Image (spheres, coloured by chain):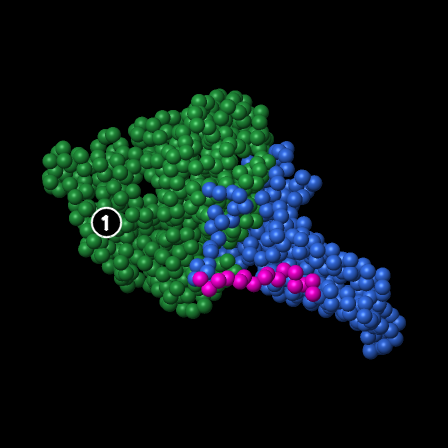
Chain colours: A green, B blue
Amino acid sequence: MQFGGGAHTELQTASALTIEGLTYAYPEASSPALRDVSLTLECGDFALLAGRSACGKSTLLRAACGLVPHFHGGEISGHVEVAGIDAISTGPGDLASAVGYLAQDPETQVVSTTVAAEIELPLEMRGDPPTSRARAVEEVALALAIPHLLDRAVDTLSGGELQRVALAAALVTRPQLVLLDEPTSQLDPVAGDELIWLLRRLNAEWGVTILLAEHRLERCLAAADHVIAMDSGTIAYDGSPRDFLTWAQDADQALETPSARLFSLVGIAPLPVGVREARRKLASRSAADGVEADPLQTACTFSSPTSRRQQPHSPPKKLSAEGVRLDSTPALRARDLWVELFSNDSPRDVLRGMDLKVSSGERVALMGRNGAGKSTLLKAAANLIDPVRGKIEMSHGIALLTQNPSDFLVRERVGDELPGDAGLAALRIVGLERSIDADPRDLSGGERQRLALAIALAGRMEGDELPGLVALDEPTRGMDRARKDDLAALIGELATRGAGLLVATHDVEFAALFAERVVLLGDGVVIADGPTAEVLSGGWYFATEVARVLDLPGVITPEQGAAALRKVEEGG
Amino acid sequence: MRSPFAYSPRPGPLQSASAGAAVAYLGSLVAVAFIYSNPIVLTATGVATVLAGRLAGARAAVRAALWMGFTLALLIVVVNALVVSRGDTVWVRWGSVPWFSDIVTAEAVTAGAVLGLRAAVVMVAFAVYSACVDPDRVLRALRPIAGRSALTATLVSRLVPVAAADAGRLRDAARLRGPGAAPVGKAPLARRLLAGSLDRAVDVAATLELRGYSLDAPPAKSRRSRSRYDRRFYATGAIVLAVAIAGKALGADSFSEYPATEIGSGAATLAVAAVVALSGLAPLRRPLVRKASDRTSRPRRTASNSLPAGVKI
């Protein structure tokens, strides 16, 4: 297959990306975003860019495609070369044939009305003749499995479809280097995995060099053959994925993957870079030790079709497990809930006769594919959408925090957003009472999210008593693990104070961290409902990495996994 | 929910036609609406635009434009009736009121109705254009002529739906604020939307940069620059314009509002009206005649069969 005949050649000798001594500061910034960064990506590399939020990953990607400094301005020194082209003296337009860039938000990455026009645009700008453009569009559409979308208007596409179209537009010139900035942050686990393996295929089959910035390392570490970790604008690690895990163990445990954590807890070395390697390692270890009760064998036995039918993927169950309060006051009760929304100019039932109960003090993760109805359920509960049939009852109201906390922030002082005693009480709940005079823009991402939550809570509390239900819609987008830990702690605190917590999320590891119960939606109905350990260990996509490694019922976290492995070994 | 005026890719002669042909055709109808004041010809122009829109599959756009157009027309009729004191046929006499006429005449109402009809016809024509003509093709046609304007227009055309989505989210967030939080008025919300839109504009502009919009590459030929329907629309537009100009010269636009309404309905007027009304059939698609054996296997559009002639994979 051949795309638009760009900078790609059969024999590529130059490095895809060379950065030497790069230091860059945004205009009016007090400190540089990148400090003395040097790295090299060889042609055909699949590199993963890791690091905490605001460590400089996005700036590095923008420097590699020429947006920094040509588009953003600022002060720059050092050398950036992409496929033999000097990216600092050349603008992003001239680099367009050599480098493709895909950012986090697909909404702002399409500029045409139809999919075909969007994909064709870079070739047209380059002055390619119609026949070669037609062929390139056709081939990239086939490669990304989107030929059926070519005639669609871009504003009728889902987030996942839009992300693929933006990727197609980035790839159509057949660039030597593709830069991706957290492309899976808005995708469900299925679409996220599909995108990562699509990149792996493009890398393996067509030699496209990939530089991928991601927070969910467990999703893509196995696909990468090179990891670069950043810390405060500098390169903290540059090497192989396996050595990266060993490095992260000492340098920054927030960058450890769950399977690596599992192995380090049990004391198995070397650390595994993916599920397959972890399973193989465990199997060979069991065989070498002569352990009869091999966890994988156990898992295989458990995974038999007969026993699988007993798992929570089957019909929704009544809750019975520990930690779930069956008899407590329901914070939310939805009965036969039907919600109709317009999609592609025609009505569609997004929720179809849903029944759901969330108790006070209960922590529930709401999961499912993009478009399954998670956000719609939360909006219906918050009275933003009227159901066409059925009822939603709330015991003591609801405070809903939507996907973009910044939408709640309209003033330049925290105290102006939340005046009076009610405001102060809400700030106290989220731990921001000392930031009352701060400008919301000066707060960190996590603090801004807490402030937005306080705005939703203010006046809905009776004294220090919270509303019946606190709902969060996809709160971990773009968050590193340290911030997720903070959020999980806050959720636990709110539940302890008696509020029911309902959190829509695509992040299975985060759900395992905070939730005691998982409700899995599929096409507007509940398809699984049960204790977190049960639901997140009984599948493939909606399962934690540890659950996929061990495939043992109820084992979803590294700590649980380590305990189970020790038990098996002791039994052996 | 999408705007009824948003462009939707649909199969059909008007959508397949090149931007120039579609603009020539719909532009000729708009030109007639501006050249003529005769209500018979204006009504015929209105019929043509509505017919064209419906045949092109833009029913929702036509319906919305008619609703908005007639609302505007009603407003024009009322204002004209209240402020114009010309005309022989007095319907109401109510004494002197500052800024207003002391009488309401049948002629002022009729003149207002003609102005309103013209406005409604133009709105429907623009609605059909908006829903049926691919803005990408228009902008790309404009790029070699006016690069900066095309860039601005591209940014604006992309930012409109993005800003609409942002506005919806901000409204939701405002409704979700607790009663103890400071209420959000329209002004802070608008400021926030503007600030957000500027950020979004920067992102979209960055994407355009990365797509090579600023390159001085030679203008590429459009892959769909010509369509088999182009001639039809160019010819229809030319005929409508020629007939309208000839009719004007022959007195087909005979109409006087004051002091008494006189509407010409001579042969020339009726002929112009007939030609203009019939031009609304231009987007009519010839029914597909298929053999009985073909009916079971209707070809689906795939990436392969949408390629230009001569291109094979």
Image height of B198 relative to A126, above or below:
below
Query: From which residue to which does the magenta span run?
Result: B278-293
The x and y percentages for residue B60 are: 59, 63
Q: Nearer the viewer, residue A529 or A113?
A: A113
Does residue B291 belong to the magenta stretch?
yes
Q: Residue at x 61, y 52 (%)?
A: B228
* Left or right: residue A100 compared with residue B36: left
For the residue carrying disc 1, how many other residues have a C-alpha within 10 Å: few (<14), some (14-19), or many (20+)? some
Give the amino acid type for the residue marked by disc 1 in the picture.
Gly
Residue B166 in view in this figure: no
- Secondary structure, mark 1, is loop
* Left or right: residue A489 compared with residue A115: left
Does residue A300 belong to the magenta stretch?
no
The x and y percentages for residue A367 are: 36, 53
Q: Quadrant of residue A524?
A: bottom left
* Left or right: residue B220 compared with residue B42: left
Residue A117 in view in this figure: yes
Q: How many marks?
A: 1
Mark 1 highlights which residue? A554
The x and y percentages for residue B2 are: 55, 57
